[in-house]
Image: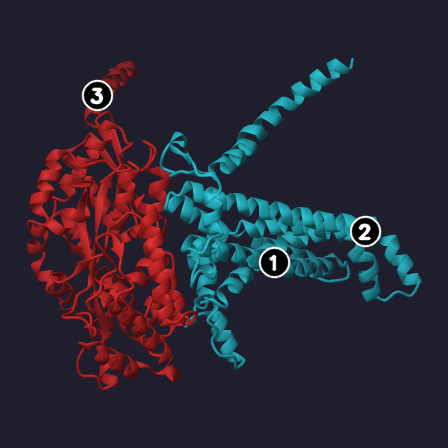
Chain colours: A cyan, B red
Amino acid sequence: MTRTYRASAGIMLAPAVTLIGVFILLPMLLTVWLSFQDWSTQTPFANASFVGLDNFREIFGPTSVGRDFKGALVNTALYTALSVILILPLSVAFGLMVYQRDVAGGTALRTVLFSTYMVPMIAVALVWSKLYSPSEGPLNQMLGLVGIGPQPWLSSPRSALVSIVFLNVWQQVGYFTVLAIAGLTQIPGSLYEAAKLDGASRREQFRFITLPLLRRTLLFSAVIGIINAVQVFEPVALITQGGPVGSTNVLTYHIRRVGIERAQGGLGSAMAVMLMLALVVVVCALFALANRKDDE
Amino acid sequence: MSLTWISKLALAAALAVMPATGWAQSVTISYLTHWSPETVTLLEAAAKDFSKTNPDVAVTVRAVPFSDLLTTLRSQGGSSDGPTIGGIYDLWLPELARDKLVAPAPEAIAGEVKGAWPAGVVSAASVGGTLYGIPNEIDVYALNYNKALFKQAGIAAAPKTWDEFKDAAKKLTNKDAGQQGFGMINSWAAGVVHPFASLLVSNGGELVKDGKPVLDSPQAGETFQLYEDLIKSGASDPAMATADANTTGPFLDNFVSGKTGMIIMANWWESALKTGMGDKFADIATAPIPVGPSGDKPHSISYSWMTVVNANAGAAEQKAAWDFLAWLNSPKSGKNGASAMSDILMSMGILPSRSSDIEAHKDKLGSEFLSGYVSVLADARPFPVVPGGQEFSESLQQTLEALQYGQVSAKDAQKNAQADAVSILERAAK
C-alpha cells in the first residue's frame, strides 16, 4: 500500500521536479561550476579550464576587477536597503489610506497607485531621465519656484543612486500597497472595536493591532522587495550606464558587462554566485528574525 | 470562359512569375547597426537597390543603441540565426576574431580592400595580418568651440597651447550663467577616454606602446594634471558632463544650448549638433587639439569602424553578406563615384575611409566644420587596438571620472590608471 502510494506520488511529482531540475537547478549548478573555471562565454563549455578559487580571489582583490565588483556589491546593497526602507512604510501608509472606508476616492487612489506598476520600465526610464535633466528638467524647475537651487540628480555620484531609488519606489509602491491592503483585510474588525471600547487611540490601534498583525505581510513584502531590488537592471542600462564614477553600477549590470560584453564567463559566474549567496543570507536572516519574533 | 479555367490560368501565371519574385529571394541576411532611424532608412534604401540586381538576396536592417551593440553581437553572434552583418568598432575586433565570431574576408575582397583603403585603416580591420571586415568610417577628434561665446569672452582665436586652452576655459566660465569653459564627458567610455587620449598624444605621450600601457610617463602625468587644474579652477563642471545610452544627454545639451564653450569631440557628432542647434550651428568651429608643454604639434586620436560577417552564418548567407558589403562599399553603388556607404556616412558628418570616397566627397569634406577634422587626420594616432582594449578603456574611464569628481588627485589617478591597465592587458594577453 505504502509502496503504491509512493510510486504514484513519484509519478505525479516527476514532471514538476524534472522541469525545476532542468530549468532552475541545472543552470544554478552550471553557474557554480563555471565560477571555478577560466571560460570565455563565446566558447563551448569543453574549453573551460579549472582555476580553483582564482575568480573569487580576483573579484575580491585589489585590481580594477575587484574594485568594480566590490563597488557594484555596495551599490546593490545600498539600492536594495534604500528601496525597501522607503517602499515598506509608504505601502503601509498608502494601504491604510486606501483601506479606510471613510476616505473618499479610495478606489481611484488604489487604481492610480497600481497604474505606475503597469507602466513599462522603458517608458519610466525615458520620462524620469528627462525629469531629472539638470538644466531643463521639470524637477529642478519646480525646486527653483520654491527657492531651491538646481540639483545634479543623475549627474553626481552622490545623488545618482538615490535618484534611481526614487524612480524604483515610484514604480513599485503601488504593487506593495496592494499587498498591504491584502494584509489589512485579514485583520478582524472586532479587534479594533474592542480596542476602541478600551479607549485605545488610533495611533495605539495601529501600533498594537495593525502593525503586529501585518508582520507576515510585511515579511513577504520585504522578501519580494529585496529580490526585486537586487535584480535592478533596466534603469541603469537605459539611463546611467552605471555612471558617473560607477556610482550606479549595480551587480546585474556589472555581471552583464563582464560576462557578456567582455566574455569573461568565469569571472561573471563567480560574481553571480556571490550575488546569489548574499541574497540567500539576507533572506534567511530576515526569516530567522521573523521566526524569533513569532516565538517571543 | 468558365470560372474553373480562369482559376487554372491564374494559377499558371502565378507559378510562372514566382521564380522571379518570391522563390527568387532565397537568402535573407540581416545587418546590425547602432545608427539612428533616419540613417537606417538610408541603409534600407541602399539594400533595396542591391536587391534590384540581386533578387535572390533580401537584406533586413536592425538597429540597437550603441551601448547594446557589442552585447547583441556577443549574445547573438554565436548563432547562425544571429545578425549576418554587424557594424563594429575596431577596438572590439581582436576579441571577436579570437572568439571566432567574425569571418575572415574572402581573398578577392581582402585584395580589393588592401588596394582601395589607406594601410592604417586596413591594419585596424585586420588581426594577425588577416582582414576581417570592410572598413567604412574613420573618426578623429578635434577641438569644437562656440565662436559666439569666444567673442563674448573677448577671445580672438582658438587656443593652440595648453596655457592658452586653460586661459580660454577660464574666460569662458560664468558660474552665475551656468556656463563652463571646457566640457568633459562622463558615463560613456569612449567619450571620456578619447578626448583625454587626444590631449595626451598632443603632449607627446601615448596610452600603449608595444602592447604595454605607458600611462606612467611624465607626459601622461601632465595630462592628468591638466584635468585636475580644469576641474579645480571650476572651468569644467562634471555635473554638466553626463552622457546617456545613446551617447547624447546633458553633455550634448549643454554644448548645443551655449552653456559649454569648448569640447573635444569626434566628427560624427556633426549631425547631433545640427539637429540640436539649427541655425546656431554656424557658431561652431573646429580647431586642432591644443599642444601640451611636452608635445611637438597637434595630434589627435582616431578610430575606425568596419562591417564584419558572422562566422557562424550559413555559407550562402556569408557569401550574400560579402557580396552586399562589397557592393555597398564600391564606387558603383553611390552618387558621382562615391560608395553608397560613404553617402550614408556623410549624411551624418562621418568621414569615409575609402580613398576614392574621400575624393568623391571632396566638396562636402571642405565644409567649415569637417575641414577641421580632415586637416588633423594626417597627424592622428590610432587608438590602440589590443586584446582587452575595451576593458582597458572602461577602467581608464572610471579613473578619469573619479578625477573629474575630485575623488582622487591627478597623481593617484595616474598611478591607478597605470596599475589597472597593466593588470588588464596582461590578463587579456594570456
Q: Amino acid at mark 1?
A: Ala
Residue B13 badge: 3
SS assignment at label 2: loop
Please provide percent x and percent y for residue B87: 25, 46
Q: Chain of mark 3?
A: B
Q: Which residue is mark 1?
A: A81
Q: Residue at x 30, y 50 (%)?
A: B34
Q: Amino acid at mark 2?
A: Ile
Please provide percent x and percent y for residue A219: 71, 50
SS assignment at label 3: helix
Q: Amino acid at mark 3?
A: Ala
Residue B242 in view of the camera: no
Q: Residue at x 29, y 69 (%)?
A: B221
Residue A187 badge: 2
Placement of the N terminus of chain A among the 4 image quadrants: top right
SS assignment at label 1: helix
Q: Are marks 1 and 2 in contact (CB under 8 Å)?
A: no
Are both tags, 1 and 2, on one chain?
yes
Instruction: Write down the quadrant of residue B311 in the picture.
Output: top left
